[in-house]
Structure formats: structure tokens, C-alpha cells
Amino acid sequence: MRILLVEDAEGLGEVIQDQISDEGHALDWVQSLSHAETSLHTTHYDLILLDLMLPDGSGIDLLQKIRQSGKTTPVIILTARDQISDRIKGLNAGADDYLVKPFDLSELSARIAAVSRRYAGNPNPIRQIGTLEVDLTRHFISRDGVSINLTAREWALFEAFIQRPGTVLSKSQLEDHLYAFGAEIESNTIEVYISRLRKKLGKDYFETVRGLGYSMRRP
Amino acid sequence: MTSQQMTSPQMKSPQSLQKVLGIGLTVGVSLLWMVALSGAVYVSHNKLNELFDSALTETAQRIMPLAIVEIYNREDPKQSQQIMSFAAHNERLVYLVRNELGQILLQSHNADPTIFNQTLLEGFSSSATHRFYGVSAVQNTLHIEVAEPLTQRRAATIEMAISLLWPLVLLIPLCFIGSWVFVRYSLRYVIAYRDEIESRGSGNLSPVRVKGLPTEVLTIAKSVNNLLDRLRRALESERAFTANSAHELRTPIATALAQIQRLQQEVSAEPIKDKLVKIETTIKGLSSLSEKLMQLAKAEGGGLLSTERHDLISLLRLIIDDTQRSVSARTITLTLPPNGEFTSIIDPDAFAILIRNLLDNAIKHGINNQPVEIHFSSEGVLRIVNAAKVIPAETLVQLRQRFVRSNISVQGLGLGLAIADAIVTGVGATMTFNSPATGRADGFEVSVDFSVIDN
């Protein structure tokens, strides 16, 4: 997933970035509302992590702008404000979830996964795809009781296809999904990861649509 | 100030301005009327006396020549004669004509010589019962004295006084009703001001706006609005301070916690990992303590009541939903009324702090794997029940105190129920603890009645 983190606290932002990146997601981290708006204009994000008290304004204002523009990108508010009235205000402004600081990093990861599953239209974390049994919460795949190990990047790519079943995803969309701004991407990176996934999961799961990209199918 | 203090026997109970003014004006008008009446009676009485005296003089002056002719035309002028009346009538004026020796020569038909002066007096004189006028003629050889009973004058004065008193019988109720209506009309804006203050919730700190207040009350109203404004700004800045403090405290704690958790993921050596777990536990404890202290500050500060009504049931659902995410291992059963709405003026944030603390207490001190039961009735009574050993009555009493825990084997700060108690007291609700819980042989039950807040 390509995630935008809007957080002005230096230390916290760094840790969240490390955690999310380790899980295989691409994360762009900005520290002000103005930078967040610029990023949102230029890039499609699968999820936004939004702090409320930012140096140039309130995150609620940005959230309202996002919703007014018609974007349905899931938003999780990360804030030190724990009042129920702030929570109601945030949810009414269009937030999908609300996490109060301090929080466990594992809880943050779980909320990100839950919100993205809800956004994809299927909140059930256990999926049966062909002969594969997938646990989206634990990042676990098995076939006939035998586990299949994926690296963080391979899992992130696999998750991108699960969230959009049957949709053809272009190479650049998949790159956006895996890499943040400034990351060095080899020209054949996506092909390499698709090849690895085919090897681990089965070649029939991924179809190459010539000139357009890749899609996942149920064999 | 509590209502008990307001109704203390040492304090004079407040009186209705309308009633005081109504009674005061009526008594005042009545007294004025009585003074005016006394003056009128006094003046009239004097004038009547002058009039009656004049009539006496005139009567004597008119009768005397006739009496002289009558006496001198007799065969024996020294013979006494009583004038006979032509027709029966009530004779009010009586007279005697006497010679210089006091012998009666002529008298009116109803005249009683005993009531007259024994000596021959000139001019006006009075006895206890009569008013006299005497005059002499024919070189003081004949004397006439006309008498008039004083009862007649008194009767005239009394009749006049009574005729002036009669309107007062009508005037007193008319004056009371009139002044009551007039005072009520004059005080209509003051009454509207009172109703506006009475009808607003105790959390409503917006200015009281009533037009047409008299200048005497307008100054008070302005001062009240200034005070409300100062109070509102003080509470807002207190809230802002709490929110900013929360941000300033929580963000570095969140950073430290996140850093420690990242380190735990990266370190594989067990001794270091154990130390990191201890540091994480300490940071979480610090986070919990700072949160509880901020909650206690809010609970003991102002702003526990809102200017608007909020549905407590939907708030409760939101809080429980939030809590269930982090305590998924423990079942929370929620029982709500079927028609599902109970509104109150309790501040939603204060309500949330109260519920979280009660729930946190039930989860921490309840027996593992036993559900925490939450009931909210349509009458606004919340009951939170958790399975637990029966707590002695003397311990139950102490649970509202800070840093007191019934079970020291459970990690906790002993602030949860103290915070809950401060909020409940601050909003005017009631909270009771029961152990064993109602209908059970064990357990701990907290019951909060929100219905009494509005009363």
C-alpha cells in the first residue's frame, strides 16, 4: 500500500515510517498540512495517517478538504487528543478510524490492515483464493496446511492484488504501491517480484495483460 | 451553595417582590385614605358645628321677638306657657324663655327645663348632651336659650365619615389587584429574565438576553453576563490547556514507546530484550498515570456540564466499541433500552472519562474470562457489573478515595473510582457501589443515576 503519514513529531514519524516500511508498504512522511496537500495532489494514496495538531493548522481541516473533493481514501487519525468530542468530530469529518497516542505499533499495523480491508469491501481477514488460504492479519499464506513465506515486499505486492481482485494494475501503480518518494527503483523490479510470487504461489495466479499490466485471477 | 443551605432556618426565606409591593402599596394607599378621611371629617365636623351654631343663633334671634309679643299680650305676663305643636313631630331644637329671675315664661312643647343651664348665659355654651345659645332682650328682663342635642351633630359627623369609609372597602381589594397587575406588568421583563435563567441548564454559560429590563436590574444582568463570559473563557482556556498539555505529554511518550517497541523488534539478545520490555512497561505506566492525572484535573475542574443535551446511549455505544478493540479477550455485554435514547446535559468528554474509568476498573478487578455486564436503563441508570469476590462493606466505603485499591494484586493506580466519583459529584449525579452485585452471590456493581442531573 502507498500510505501518507502527516505527523510533525520527528521521532514518532521516523518510527512509524520504519514500522510501515518494514511491513512492505510505501510510506511518504510529511510534517505539515501544506506538504500533505501537495502530496495528495500529485500521488494516489491507499491510506492516510493524519495527526490533528499540526504546525500550520488542524488535520480536521485537511480531512474535510479531502472529503469535499470527493476522495474516499481511508484516513486514520493519530492524535494526542483523547476526548470523545474530538473523536466524534474526527469521525464526523470523515475519518475511518481514530488512534490515540501513545499507541502500540502492532495496534497501528492492525488498524491499518482493518481499515484497508473494510475499504476494499471485505472486512474478513481470512480469504480463500483458489487453493490458498490467506490470513491478512497475520500476513500468513498456506496451501494444504503448508505455510508459504513471503518477504515484506512480496506480501505488499500480493496485498495490492487482493485489494483489487480482477483489476489490471499497471507497472507504475504497483511501483507506487511499493515505493515511497525518492526510492530507487530498478526498471524490472515489478517483473522480478511478480516472477517470485508466481514461483511461490503458482504461475496461474497472476496474468500478464500485455501493454497494460498485471491482474490476479482465481485458477 | 446547596439547596439545604438555601432553606436553612437561619436564613430568611425569599419573598416575592410582587407580593411585597402589592401589600405595601395597598396598605400605603389605605393609610393615606384614612389620613385624608380623618382630615375631611375633622374639617367637616368644624364646619357642621359652625352651621349648627349659626342655626341656633338664627332660631333664638327669630323666636325672641315673637316670644316678647306673646308674653306681653298675656293677661298675666308672669304665667308660664308651653307652646303646643300643630302636628306631631320630632323636635330637635327646644327653647326656654325666662325672666331675669329665671322663671320660665315660655317653652317649646318638648322642652325639658332640666337640660338647660340653670344660670342665664349669653352666647354659646355646652353641656354633656346639648349645645346652647342664649340671648337677652328688653333690657335683660327676658332671656331665651335654644338647645340642640349634641347627638344630632355626632350623627351627622359619623354618617359623613361612614359615607367616606365605604369606598375604602372597595378600594383595598381594587388597589391590591391593581397594584399586583401593574407590578406584574412592570416586572414582566424581570420575570422573563428569571424564567430564562431558571429554564437554562446549569452548564449553559451563554449570555442571558432579555430585552426591556428596567435600569435597576439591567446593571445586575450586565454583571451576570460579564461573570458568565469570564467563567466561560476560564473554562475554555482550562480545556485548551488540558488539550495542549495532553498533546505535549502524550506525543513524547508515544515517541518513546514507539522507539522502544521498534528496538524490541530489532534486538534478538534476550537480556536486552527483557530490559526493553521493562522500559516499555514503565513508559506505559507513565502514560497511564499522566492520563489519569489529567482526567482527575478535568473531573475536579469546571466544564462537566454541557450547554447542549447529548444522547448518552449513542455515546456509550461509541465508548464500548472503542474499548472492545483493545480488550478483545474479555467479553463486554451491553444491554440497552429498546427505544434507545436518553439525553442529558453532562459533558460528553466527562461522560466518556467516567465510563472508561468504571469499565477499566471492572476489567482490571474482574475475574478473568468472566464477562463485564453493562446495563443502561431508559430511566438513565447505568450499571456496570463484574465478577469478583465479595468486597467488605468497609472497603467499599474507601473506594472513592484516591490511591485506594480493593485488590493490591492487580496493577492499578487507585485513581479510577476517585475520578469517577469526582465527575459524578461535579455533575450532580449519584453513584453507588454494591458487593455482591444485585441478584448475584458475588461480584462488584457500580450504579450511576444520570436522571438526577437535570433535577
Image (cartoon, coloured by chain):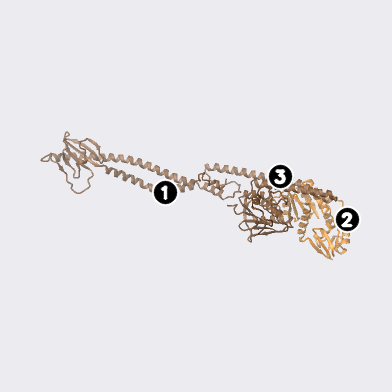
Q: Tag 1, which secondary structure?
A: helix
Residue B208 percent location from the top left of the image: 58, 46
Q: Is disc 3 surrounded by few (<14), some (14 to 19) or many (20+) residues within 10 Å?
A: some
Q: Quadrant of the C terminus of chain A?
A: bottom right
Viewer-nearest of labels 2 and 3? 3
Residue A170 percent location from the top left of the image: 84, 58
In the rendered image of this protein, which colour is used for chain A? orange
The Cα–Cα distance between marks 1 and 2, rounded to whole angstroms, is: 103 Å
Q: Is disc 1 surrounded by few (<14), some (14 to 19) or many (20+) residues within 10 Å?
A: few
Disc number placed over residue A189 in the picture, else none: 2
Give the residue drawn at x 64%, y 45%.
Answer: B235
Residue highlighted by disc 3: B245
- Judging depth in this view, the residue of A97 and B422 nearest the camera is B422
In the rendered image of this protein, which colour is used for chain B? brown
* Residue B230 relative to residue A127: left or right: left
Identified by mark 2, the residue type is Thr
Identified by mark 1, the residue type is Leu
Residue B448 percent location from the top left of the image: 63, 54
Q: Is disc 2 surrounded by few (<14), some (14 to 19) or many (20+) residues within 10 Å?
A: few
The chain that hosts pointer 2 is: A
Identity of the residue furthest to the top in this view: B139
Query: Does mark 2 fall on the same chain as mark 1?
Result: no
Q: Tag 2, which secondary structure?
A: helix
Q: Quadrant of the N terminus of chain A?
A: bottom right
Residue highlighted by disc 1: B174
Residue B320 percent location from the top left of the image: 69, 56
Viewer-nearest of labels 1 and 2? 1
Position of residue B158 relative to residue A185, above or below, is above
The Cα–Cα distance between marks 2 and 3, rounded to whole angstroms, is: 47 Å
Q: Is residue B127 visible?
A: yes
Q: Is residue A12 visible?
A: no
The chain that hosts pointer 3 is: B
